[in-house]
Image (cartoon, rainbow, N blue to C red):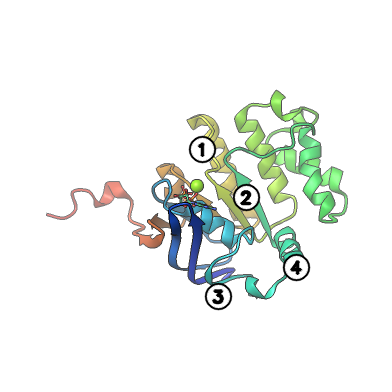
Amino acid sequence: MNSVIKVSQLTKQVETQEGPLKILKGIDLDVKPGESLAIVGPSGSGKSTLLGIIAALDTPSEGEVSIDGVNLAQLDEEQKAALRKRSTSFVFQSFMLVDTLTALENVMLPAELAGVQGVKQRAEQWLERVGLSHRLHHLPNQLSGGEQQRVALARAFISQPKVLFADEPTGNLDPANGDKVADLLFELNQDQQTTLILVTHDQKLAARCERQVRMVEGQLHEVSSAPINLVVGETG
Ligand code: ADP
Ligand code: MG
């Protein structure tokens, strides 16, 4: 099967007051359509930087990224923006809803920009899907954190992205709301065949992904898929 995301020999170096800083040191990664992948690892190891580059929001210093067979290096900014709109969505730890717009308007906004037909009806359907039919006209500050993140999920899925990027999607939620958001993420990953690439500190959430990779000081390592509680005590 073809890869929906292909990353090869990717590096990122930035200039700081203390001199050049190598954030990413030669990343290779292949993600198959429909796969769910968790990127775990300590704070400051480069996870968000990698996610931003794969999502075409940031550019690498060296190496290549392809989304759906398109090499990002060959696109100008306008073409990259069009690719992002067409094929990807992003969910953030801090929800990133527009404060002055209702739940419904927040979900409609990017879909309207992307020229989706019948936006209002589809936005209502998506809010129903995430269990928020009774919150259509509420502003973000009238919603709980879990509800806000579910609005963000509806907004992310309305454009039927090939790839959904999520950076600590449950990081600001209590366990119960985190579980609800995670359940929805995996339901939609399955139903919509959306490829899911998420960064998380939440071991439980990471373990629900088909594959885990660990970032350590700018390098990625595959994580064995065996559940930890089966490995413990198995070897003598
Ligand atoms: P993570 O998401 O794993 O916590 P990040 O990708 O946010 O890590 O950051 C990795 C490291 O690179 C951190 O030490 C961060 O401070 C640094 N960093 C990220 N972006 C920049 C930048 N534009 N300029 C300087 N340092 C940066
Ligand atoms: Mg981060």
Q: Position of residue 120 (x, y in %)?
A: 86, 43
Label 4 CA crowd tier, 10 Å (few <14, some 14–19, many 20+): few
- CA distance separating discs 1 and 3: 33 Å
Q: Considering only order in the chain, which callout, 3 or 4, is on the residue closer to the N terminus?
A: 3
Residue 188's disc is 2
Mark 3 CB lies closer than 8 A to ligand 1: no
Residue type pointed to by label 3: Met
Label 2 CA crowd tier, 10 Å (few <14, some 14–19, many 20+): some
Res. 121 image quadrant: top right
Q: In the image, which is nearer the foreground, mark 1 or mark 3?
A: 1
Residue 22 horizontal side relative to residue 63, left or right: left
Q: Position of residue 79 (x, y in %)?
A: 75, 68
Residue, disc 3: 1
**In the foreground, 193 or 195:** 195
**In the foreground, 131 or 36:** 36
Residue type pointed to by label 1: Gly
Residue, disc 1: 171
Disc 1 is placed on an element classified as loop
Q: Considering only order in the chain, which callout, 1 or 4, is on the residue closer to the N terminus?
A: 4
- CA distance separating discs 2 and 3: 21 Å
